[in-house]
Image (cartoon, helix red, strand yellow):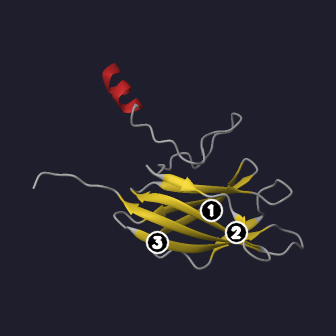
Amino acid sequence: MMTTGILLAGCDNKPAVNLGGIGGTPNPYNYMKPSGQCQVSTPAAAGKNTRTATMQVRSDDGYCAIETRVSAGHPYASFGVSPAPEHGKAFIYNYNDHTYVTYTANTSYSGEDKFRVVLIPGGSQPREYMDVTATVTASAVSGAQ
C-alpha cells in the first residue's frame, strides 16, 4: 500500500491555478480534475473593457483555469459565456474573492478553440469581456498494435 502511494505521488498534476481550499474554506469545485498541461497568460488589455488571454491545455478531460477579479479586488457579480467554445466547455464561478474561468477540452480534440467570457462587475459599471484562445493538444495514447 505504501509503495502505491509513493508511485502515485510522482503522478501528481499541479494546475496553473490552485482550486483547493484557501484559508481553511473548502472549495466546492475542488473535485474537478486538473489537466496534465495547463499554461495560461495573464489577461492583457485589448480595447475598451476587453482583455485577451491564452491557454495551452491537453484534451485529457481535465480543466485549465484563469483567475480574475474586478479592479477593486473583488469577484465579479455575474458572468456568462457568449459565444461558447466549440470544442470543449467553459465553467465560471466565484470562490474566495476571485472569479475563475475554467476550460475543459473535448477528449481527444487537438487544435484551437475560442470563447468569450462576459464579466459583470455589478452596480452601474459596464460589462467587461475576456476573449480566450485555447491551444489544445491531444493526449498521447499508446498501445500494442
Measured from the top left, where is residue 63 in percent x and y? 50, 55
The picture quadrant where one finds residue 3 is: top left
Which residue is at the front of the view, 23 or 142?
Answer: 142
Mark drawn on residue 92 = 1
The residue type indicated by label 3 comes to Glu
Cβ–Cβ under 8 Å for marks 2 and 3: no
The residue type indicated by label 2 comes to Phe
Mark drawn on residue 79 = 2
CA gap between label 2 and label 3 equals: 23 Å
| Left or right of 73, for residue 64 | left
Which residue is rendered at x = 50% and y = 50% of the image? 32
The residue type indicated by label 1 comes to Ile
Which residue is rendered at x = 42% and y = 57% of the image? 58
Which residue is rendered at x = 76% and y = 50% of the image? 97
Seen in the picture, residue 105 relative to 73 is either above or below; the reply is below
Measured from the top left, where is residue 137 in percent x and y? 40, 61
Neighbours of disc 1 within 10 Å: few (<14), some (14-19), many (20+): some
Cβ–Cβ under 8 Å for marks 1 and 2: yes
The picture quadrant where one finds residue 11 is: top left
Of marks 2 and 3, which one's residue comes earlier in the chain? 2
Give the number of marks.
Answer: 3
Which residue is at the front of the view, 27 or 64?
Answer: 64
CA gap between label 1 and label 2 equals: 7 Å
CA gap between label 1 and label 3 equals: 20 Å
Q: Secondary structure at mark 2?
A: strand
Of marks 1 and 2, which one's residue comes earlier in the chain? 2
Residue bearing mark 3: 112
| Left or right of 3, for residue 126 | right
Q: Secondary structure at mark 3?
A: strand
